[in-house]
Amino acid sequence: MSPKVVDKQKKRDKILRAALKVFSDRGIADFKMIDIAKAAGIGKGTIYEYFSSKEDVITGCFEIFMHDFGDILASGLGEKSNPKEKIINFFKLSFKYFSQHQEAMSVLFDFWAAGIPRKHGTPLIPSMKKEYFEFQKYLAAILEDGIKENYFKQHDTQTTALIILATLDGLMFQAVLGVIDIEDKSLPDKISNTLLEGILNE
Amino acid sequence: MSPKVVDKQKKRDKILRAALKVFSDRGIADFKMIDIAKAAGIGKGTIYEYFSSKEDVITGCFEIFMHDFGDILASGLGEKSNPKEKIINFFKLSFKYFSQHQEAMSVLFDFWAAGIPRKHGTPLIPSMKKEYFEFQKYLAAILEDGIKENYFKQHDTQTTALIILATLDGLMFQAVLGVIDIEDKSLPDKISNTLLEGILNE
Amino acid sequence: MSPKVVDKQKKRDKILRAALKVFSDRGIADFKMIDIAKAAGIGKGTIYEYFSSKEDVITGCFEIFMHDFGDILASGLGEKSNPKEKIINFFKLSFKYFSQHQEAMSVLFDFWAAGIPRKHGTPLIPSMKKEYFEFQKYLAAILEDGIKENYFKQHDTQTTALIILATLDGLMFQAVLGVIDIEDKSLPDKISNTLLEGILNE
Amino acid sequence: MSPKVVDKQKKRDKILRAALKVFSDRGIADFKMIDIAKAAGIGKGTIYEYFSSKEDVITGCFEIFMHDFGDILASGLGEKSNPKEKIINFFKLSFKYFSQHQEAMSVLFDFWAAGIPRKHGTPLIPSMKKEYFEFQKYLAAILEDGIKENYFKQHDTQTTALIILATLDGLMFQAVLGVIDIEDKSLPDKISNTLLEGILNE
DNA sequence: TATGAATGAGCCTTCATTCAT
DNA sequence: AATGAATGAAGGCTCATTCAT
């Protein structure tokens, strides 16, 4: 009488975790649906019980990635009171997340490429710009607070926020390439020294 | 040496220019060989007279892109004597290049994604890391000069070079997304103020 | 004998009625098992408690269709004594049936196509020819009676029966296409005038 | 310099002939694209150089079928002057065509089923009704001529035309089922005797 | 040298059927 | 008995690549 009961959300999540692993190993440009099925230990057709298409898996994967990353940031948010420390902490938390989720790091740039608007067709991840603004807002708020607290000079916080984000993004790419090591504990301070001195009040 | 060779080279280049346009419009993940043939105004089979495979076109395209970009940097290299100006100039020249080659900007991140090493298979652009080191060397040399000239503090120039590169890369991504405008003439100074103050000697 | 068996039969019938509706809406070539389940208000798997396969549902559906249609004919059989009226009545009863079962009308030609013998494989409805002979027998008997009663000329009743059946079938197709309207009460007489005059005794 | 030249129209036609054969052998509901490729002696992908989809092949096949059949009718059109003979000739020509194109006969009823309008989706052959009206027009014109020539009684020629068409269609179905034999030379006269006497002027 | 018709490997997706609950 | 989650066989279609012209 009662059919098999499955936690749909949980299984969807399980598939997405498998997908992330596959994306990381083969790249979004190259993976096959069967790869994900195998990685998730399920049949090929089962994926389509939870996702409508290949693209839907990619999009879903981006969403949990953003969600996870957002959680990490939120969890470490209130820890520091010094505004400069907060920014450094942003780098530290980011490094920590990607250090713990190596797969996410490789995939990040596939996501980027998939988020770029094109003359032809809709990008796979149309929400990329919106997501970017969220991060900008997050950092700009910290900078604004820093100015209010007289810790930072008066300056264009929106642009600085973008520059900080740009640096993080670029560093993540270097990490993926193997040019830098995000486990290197001295890195956040070096970044801070290069990036933030210009906006400090003497 | 013979005119035939020159012609071959010229046509190969023509195809690559067409390819870059196509990559920009559709993304490297999505383009078809026929797109390039149409864009180049030639037959589908003709591409294979100049390239051994689809991958070969992508790789070739990355090469002319790097070559072009290198030329721009080299051409503007000697213009400034002030080390800080040299770094700012690096951003200015980069912005100028991508401003003049909008297609290249969209494709940049496809190239990035194609350069990431994977657990499975060889990346499409295996030379990415090597190229990255070239840029690092270029910037580190400027920074070292700046230290010798007592313009910059003593500091870890290799890491600073990477941070500067990271920022440029990240900003390019923002430009592609439409978050920043690289035509904005105030941008290089803002970047310099945020990035370089920390390493300036008072 | 036991109530269970009756229930089984009843539910099987319910599924077949739902199937007929689905066949009508989507065509036999296009329907899915899930469509029938939904139309019957049951689970997908439940169909397989009553039918061994998709083909079995189609066959079963054809059977109830023939059964229903046969009932209609049998019920109206004895009403007329005039042989010509009996033939006209055959058309009238057929039109009445399909008028009351619009779904059956659309499906009729799917059944036809499914009844055609092929070089490759067995037709879905192998009994089509046998069923056809039943109708031929039914009509030929009426015609033979008419000859005995001196109402009809001596003629090849078997062939005439087939011609009458052919005309009915063809008209049903026109009705499905929307070329004729089987509700049109003048139609049976027009048919009779065209079809039967040739065999009437002056 | 000059590429391979192919008579696109001829090859398209070749594929359609192969398709008709396949439809006949397996039915439209059951055939695979690879069947057609094999029957045409070409590769699977080649079909898609000439047709956009599986459906497009079916539609194209219906078109050449109608074209061929129209040609047969047109070729035998003027041969008879007696209006009754013209109608009989219509049957004779139809029988001749299907006798010479056995494949077309089996497929006819697949086409029919594919022409039926459905509540869900567009029929594969939406032009079926339009085609039907052409035949009706063709026969009604012959009947009208017969009336003018005082050969036929005044009567509803449109309906008679439909009844004649209906009979032909139904007979073709019987032929496919193997109930009648269209090679039987006595058949057209029997049909005429049953069908047309009622509209003859005594 | 240039071409585009031909090809088939390969992959996404569907859906009839199964079976654990 | 009833269910619907799971499955994988199957097939339509794409497109990089080849090669006859």
Image (cartoon, coloured by chain):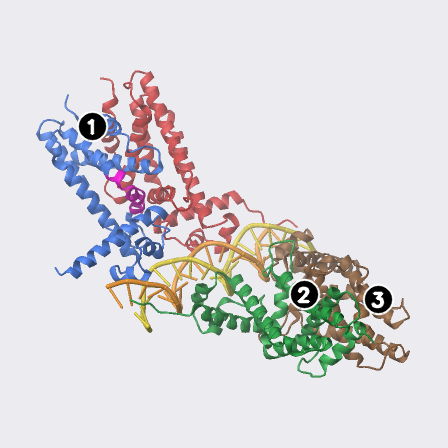
Chain colours: A green, B brown, C blue, D red, E yellow, F orange
Q: What percent of the width, then of the height, locates residue B81?
A: 91, 70
Q: What percent of the width, then of the height, locates residue C184?
A: 28, 30
Other-residue count near label 1 (Cα within 10 Å), few / some / many at <14 / 14–19 / ≥20: many
Element at label 2: helix
Q: Chain of mark 2?
A: A
Regarding residue B42, the answer to whether it shows in the image is no
Residue A163 inside the magenta-drawn segment: no
Judging by the rendered image, the residue that carries numbered circle 3 is B89
* Image quadrant assignment for residue D68: top left
In front here: A68 or C8?
A68
Regarding residue B33, the answer to whether it shows in the image is yes
Q: What percent of the width, then of the height, locates residue B150?
A: 90, 79
Q: Are marks 3 and 1 in contact (CB under 8 Å)?
A: no
The image quadrant where one finds the C terminus of chain A is: bottom right
Judging by the rendered image, the residue that carries numbered circle 1 is C196
Q: Nearer the viewer, mark 2 or mark 3?
A: 2
- The part of the chain drawn in magenta is C97-113
Element at label 1: helix
For badge 3, the amino acid type reads Asn
Residue A137: which disc? 2
- Say above or below: A168 vs C105: below
B158 displayed left or right of C136: right
Other-residue count near label 2 (Cα within 10 Å), few / some / many at <14 / 14–19 / ≥20: some
Element at label 3: helix
